Amino acid sequence: MKVIRYVVLSALLALAACSKKADEKPTVAATPAAPPVVTINGQAISQQLLDDYVKAVAGENAANISAEDREQIRENLVRIVLIAQQAEKDGVTKDVEVATRIELSRLNLIQQAVAARYLKERVPTEADLRAEFDSQLAATPLVEYQAKHILVDGEDVALKAIQQLQSGTDFGTLARRLSKDKSSAEKGGDLGWFAPNRMVKPFADAVALLKKGEYTKTPVQTQFGWHVIQLTNPRDRAPPAFDDVKEQLGQIVLQKKFKAYSDEMIKTAKIDPP
């Protein structure tokens, strides 16, 4: 790595440097006895903090960077701390917006640390993964659709398109002429094959009610506009193999475990207003 960009990325550093009073001699260290690698205007920077910053900048290559690159990263860290110290003197951290963003960063960092510690001792078992797999299968329709659509801005335009279809106008021809979804309009409105969960709910719900060849007799509204939809083909799809989705299942199980943990906190907390 020949050049290390000047990176100002660490909310943790901002908190460590800015939350102290200007007349204090704060210390950011891995342990109280750890000697600092550098002291900046009385603020001690620990080896642990420097190592973490190197990892943040260099990523997976952190262990292999040259001494020259490591020294450049150290200089960048010094710059960040100096900027944070000056920000404290200038009252930047007292700005409501800045203070709010610092507080949100602090809360997010704490949540991540708590989650990592809590979930480290709650690794999903094979039974957990199997149960989640079965739950996901039960909640997911094993069907996919091939459909066309005409997307327009107004309901009145969509209604006129439906009237033209009822008069015998070809769906693909109308899509090419009217649809503002240019990528599908070029193909006569064809969206290809998709699972229901790949589409926004109003769209997916409307498709599920159609039979092969039918189109919606009333416009379907989504955040993208107004749709006229035609179902070209439905087909069953095979469920994913358990081994292929184990990693994703593990993440889902962990998220549910941590949510249950925080749900218990909410139940016992005094929150006003609730």
Image: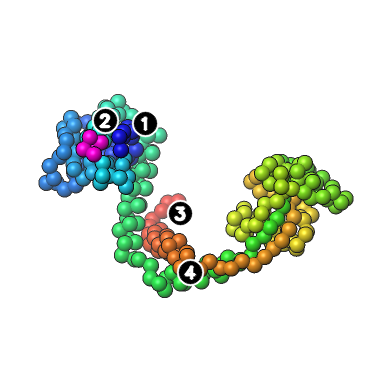
- In the image: residue 4, left or right of residue 225: left
Task: Choose the circle earlier in sequence order: 2 or 4.
Answer: 2
Read off the magenta span: 66-70
State the image quarter where residue 92 is shown.
Answer: top left
Q: What residue type is labelled 2?
A: Arg
Number of numbered discs overlaid on the protein picture: 4
Q: What residue type is labelled 3?
A: Pro
Task: Choose the circle earlier in sequence order: 3 or 1.
Answer: 1
Helix, strand or loop under label 1: loop
Q: Position of residue 140 (x, y in %)?
A: 58, 65
Task: Choose the circle earlier in sequence order: 4 or 3.
Answer: 4
Query: Can you identify the residue that label 4 sits on?
Result: 242
Query: Can you identify the residue that label 2 sits on?
Result: 79
In this rendered view, identify the residue nearer to me: 75 or 93. Answer: 75
Query: Can you identify the residue that label 3 sits on?
Result: 274
Q: What residue type is labelled 4?
A: Phe
Magenta span contains residue 168: no
x 38%, y 56%: residue: 270
- In the image: residue 99, left or right of residue 182: left
**Which mark is on residue 37?**
none
**Which mark is on residue 95?**
1
- In the image: residue 242, left or right of residue 185: left
Q: Where is residue 243 in the image (x, y as percent from the top left)?
A: 46, 68
